């Protein structure tokens, strides 16, 4: 039997959507700090275009991850349903998101590294907040990848 998620899941969902769209909009803005960071990196060596592409793909996958997150909270929703896709697609999405979490966030990791050198407590709070923000979306993605009921 399905147990409806609490209101806290809805709060996490709206925070995740808000942050994801703001980070994505900031990334694609012409003179944003992240764009300047990647322009300078690519200016030194064209190999760093891979970092830019990985970050772009990570942001796109974070936007796609809204679908299973929303459908975890509202399983009866008919707007966009994650159940139309096979669990294999959600498994690949989850694997790609986890992989890109490691290699696709060069700018974010440099930001955290610079804050770490200035204040350890703020770094701990920031990393904890990021985990609390992103973990529910990974969990919802996991549910649709591995625990979908077979129709």
Image (cartoon, helix red, strand yellow):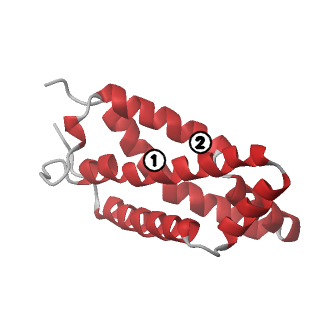
Q: Residue at x 28, y 58 (%)?
A: 6
List x then y, in percent, for residue 34. Answer: 67, 66
CB under 8 Å between callouts 2 and 1?
A: yes
On-image quarter of the C terminus? top left
Label 1 secondary element: helix
Q: Residue at x 47, y 63 (%)?
A: 20
Looking at the image, which residue sits at the far bottom?
Answer: 31
Q: Which residue is mark 2?
A: 100
Looking at the image, which residue sits at the far right?
Answer: 117
Q: Residue at x 44, y 67 (%)?
A: 21
Q: Quadrant of residue 39?
A: bottom right
Labels in figure, total: 2
Q: Is residue 11 above or below residue 63?
A: below
Any part of residue 146 in sight: no
List x then y, in percent, for residue 9. Answer: 34, 59
First-in-chain label (2 vs 1): 1
Residue 1 in the figure: left or right of residue 121: left
Label 2 secondary element: helix
Q: CA distance from mark 2 to mark 1?
A: 9 Å
The residue nearer to you, when weighing 102 against 119, is 102
Q: Is residue 48 above or below residue 39?
A: above
Q: Which residue is mark 1?
A: 61
List x then y, in percent, for residue 121. Answer: 77, 68
On-image quarter of the N terminus? top left
Q: Is residue 122 above or below residue 73?
A: below
């Amino acid at each position: 039997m399905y147990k409806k998620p609490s209101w806290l899941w809805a709060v996490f969902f709206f925070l995740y959507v808000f942050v994801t769209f703001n980070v994505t909009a900031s990334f694609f803005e012409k003179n944003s700090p992240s764009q300047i960071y990647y322009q300078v990196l690519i200016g030194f060596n064209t190999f760093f275009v891979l970092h830019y592409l990985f970050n772009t793909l990570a942001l796109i996958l974070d936007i796609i991850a809204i679908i299973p997150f929303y459908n975890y909270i509202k399983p009866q929703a008919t707007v966009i349903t994650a159940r139309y896709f096979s669990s294999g697609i959600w498994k690949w999405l989850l694997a790609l998101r986890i992989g890109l979490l490691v290699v696709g966030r060069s700018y974010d990791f440099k930001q955290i590294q610079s804050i770490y050198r200035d204040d350890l407590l703020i770094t701990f709070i920031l990393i904890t907040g990021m985990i609390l923000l992103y973990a529910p979306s990974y969990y919802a993605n996991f549910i649709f990848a591995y625990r979908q009921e077979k129709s």
